[in-house]
Amino acid sequence: MEVQKDRVKLNVGGRVFETTSTTIANAGRNSVFGAMFDESWNPISDNSGEYFIDRNPDCFAILLDFLRTGELYISANTPEKLFYREALYYGLLDQVRSAKWGQFDGNRLKISGSIMGQAPGDGTAIQAGPNGGCCVAHGSMVHVYDWMLQEHQPLNLDYQRVNDVGWADSDNIVLGVSERLGRGDGGMGIFSASTGELRYKFQVTHENQAKSYTAGALTFSSDYKIFSSCKGRSNEYGVGVWDQVTGKQIDFFYEPLGWSLGDADKLQWLEGSNCLLVATLFPRIDFCYISLLDFREKKMVWCWSDIEATLLADDKRVRDAIAMEDRNSICVVNEFEELGFMDLRSSASSIKWGSRSRLMKGKMPEEPCYPKLAVHEGQLFSSMNDCISVLSGPDWVLTSRLRRSYGGSICDFSIGGDRLFALHSEENVVDIWETPTSPIT
């Protein structure tokens, strides 16, 4: 009789399913089923002995089997978007995503889909979201996609150029925008990812006065701080810090003489050292500057510039940089996709370029895109033209290469939510790469 009490009947869209409360409990307390059971996962009686749910029965059958076995099998005749919509309704989307992807591995990534361009002009930036979606900036337009790659309400910044985009959390995105001459309408704002609504606009204040400024590169810390490079018309040149929750400016690192923080192409917050990597790269300015800022002591704790190398006509100009705290180094890449490394433990570090041949071979395209770098799950990723190289191991050996046959050069890529998104410049095509689940043996 104890087994009998554990049985549950669910009528989903006119089709009756019989299972157990033990199986349903695998959905978790935050699922739709949490309200149908008491704290011990016993059915809350409605005197009918059957629960009716007005949803798609075919998708529910797949989800029920998933709750029983922990393995996900989506039949060929079930549209994936329909299935993901149903999983979202039941509160099972996170579990479904985890079962579908498996562990991220750049060497096993397979193309899973593409999004065709939605705006004229070259893409500006792409950022993967924490829940598997992404946002794409094209000039003054920003397109936001959820995990099912369905587009939300696009953001139109009314001819203001978007310089960088970032995810404050799964529900909000932050945009860094250029100021229009004489309008005072630049800066940085946080927007709803689903509706495009402006939640609030961040101000730069100097001597208790709000200043107009252009926001450049963005990054975020785990304690809800937002960092942005700032370029203004008076004294607001440098890097600002805001509290994401209150929207208030809490700090500002003013640009030292002869440096170029306000024009920074890239910011990266280093959790281990509580420092900020700031990189201003060629060709935005004549010389490249890379520094680590310590806001607690209000000073640069590490810095490098290629002024001397440039004066000696060295053609290895740095195009991107990324810090790797676990190796106490900064990786840089030049326009030939040659990798170099600098030691963060040395105050006067120089670049040690790799001795191996260039990652890319063959004729350069007429309009190449500058290379980008990313580190994820212990692997190093480097884009060049229409390829992304994957490097692994202590010596960063080239182990795989991701490439599509159309779309043109890759102008930006981003990894997050266990997906890699690549933005191609010529057709504004966004490719989505995923790690397939391992076959059952």
Image: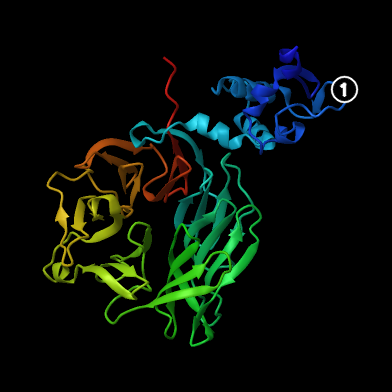
Tell which residue pokes out farthest to the right in this image.
Answer: 47
Q: Is residue 313 left or right of residue 417?
A: left
Image quadrant for the N terminus? top right
Inspect this view and state whether residue 334 appears: no
Q: Is residue 90 left or right of residue 134?
A: right
Nearest to the observer: residue 198 or residue 367: 198
On the image, the x and y values in percent for residue 71 come to: 54, 22
Image quadrant for the C terminus? top left
Name the quadrant containing residue 14: top right
Q: Is residue 145 above or below residue 140?
A: above
- The residue that disc 1 covers is 48
Nearest to the observer: residue 254 or residue 83: 254
On the image, the x and y values in percent for residue 386 come to: 34, 44
On the image, the x and y values in percent for residue 179 come to: 50, 75
Q: Which residue shows up at 60% across the image and 53% down it?
A: 171
Nearest to the observer: residue 337 or residue 365: 337
